[in-house]
Amino acid sequence: MADKYILSNSTTGDTVDLNLITGTDGPAALDITGLYKERGLLAYDPGFVSTASCTSSITYIDGERGILRYRGYPIEQLAANSNFLEVAHLLLYGELPTKTELLEFEGIISQHTMIRETMRTFFDGFHYNAHPMAIMIGVTGSMSAFYHDSLDIHDPRHREISAHRMIAKIPTIAAACYKHNVGEPIMYPRNDLDYCGNFLHMMFATPCEEYVPSKTAIEAMNLLFILHADHEQNASTSTVRLAGSSGANPFACIASGIASLWGPAHGGANEAVLKMLEEIGDVSNIAKYIAKAKDKNDPFRLMGFGHRVYRNFDPRATLIREMCHKVLAELSDEHNPLLELASQLEEVALKDEYFIERKLYPNVDYYSGIIYRALNIPANMFTVMFAIARTVGWVAHWSEMISDPSQRIGRPRQIYVGAKERDYVPIDKR
């Protein structure tokens, strides 16, 4: 491939030589960093669908072929052989840990699981029925007020400590958000349990009743967290990077990522799946709603089908589908009509030519919402679960960005389409 790309103006005959930047995998990119300075031109790309905002060595996606890799490792191999903290170590440090390194990493994370006691009282300031994501944003952003001893973002050790704190404390904060929402006492972490088992214990145990998470529940949670750990330059990760480019502290950056994740088009998709199933109501209505989904004049859409990036089957959905059926078989109430409806709808859609031709396969959000419901996690906590897992990816990208010597503050440009220059008119003459 040539290392130059020539853009020409057919009207003026003017040409611009642009360098091509190639990565390990994926399409090359045109280096337009000097385009405005040298030619007074901007690139127009709404939604940044054709813009590479950075270089990164963390995650690779090929949507056409249904490929997702963390640090070069196929997601299928990690899901089959790894656990969440091993994947977290991989994303943070770039390599799979040795047995000794993993034990050390797990020990460090367990040492940071508690939050400061004064921080626990912070939850009391939120309304009793506040959405858990609203609490997550506020409490996570407040962490810089409680853990301000290691906030020098230019110190690699401070960055590492902040990353460890975020990964360790986010499950504790998330479980506390749930407990506040349902009016139960906040549970302390149990460091004798693994990462996912500890989180489930903080969610469902009470001071008067012990909770022992099942092996299947822990296995399902590990898989969900691994599959959601990172997904390249999505909206929330880009938000974290943009906030971090200003030099903001890591807790503020992660809070901004949580805020972006809360949007229904991003992390709220699995919650939307459950709302859709509740609207359909019964298996007898499936044919009716399938027809509505096919009608371009009908606003109804099947949530959890298709994906912005994947033009083939979402590789995460392929992995989570098997786990979904395992969880339903072992843990769910066999008389739960919503879960039965979800299974029937999946079966019908996978056989329908309309969805097959358009490659509208069930995605990871479809199955994750069903698993969470089977685990008795309420719908308003679904996006919180996403945030726990994605925190690992966010801190990995934040750390990578801060350590990049070419990093600059993010400053997207615009094409102005407002009024031309005009003079101010006094109010009595308008």
Image (tube, rainbow, N blue to C red):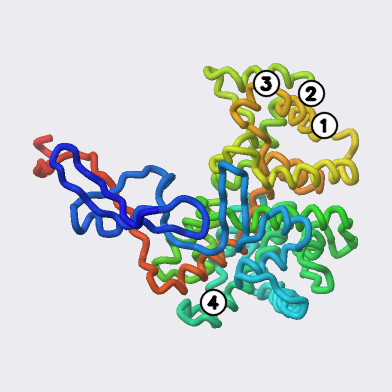
Q: Are marks 1 and 4 in contact (CB under 8 Å)?
A: no
**What type is the residue that disc 4 sits on?**
Arg
Residue receiving disc 1: 340
Q: Does 55 sit left or right of 381 as displayed?
A: left
Q: Where does label 4 land, which residue?
A: 159
Numbered disc 3: secondary structure: helix
Q: Residue 185: tell me if it is visible.
A: no
Q: How many marks?
A: 4
Q: Quadrant of residue 85?
A: bottom right
Query: Residue 388, image x and y in percent?
Result: 66, 59
Side (left or right) of 38 relative to 366: left
The label on residue 283 is 2
Q: Earlier in the sequence, mark 1 or mark 2?
A: 2
Instruction: Find the distance from the CA under tag 4 to the CA under tag 2.
Output: 51 Å
93 in relation to 82, above or below: below
What residue is disc 3 on? 289
Identify the amino acid type marked 1.
Answer: Glu
Q: Quadrant of residue 101?
A: bottom right
User: Residue at the spot x=20%, y=48% of the render?
Assistant: 15
Q: Secondary structure at mark 1?
A: helix
The answer to which of marks 4 and 2 sits earlier in the sequence is 4
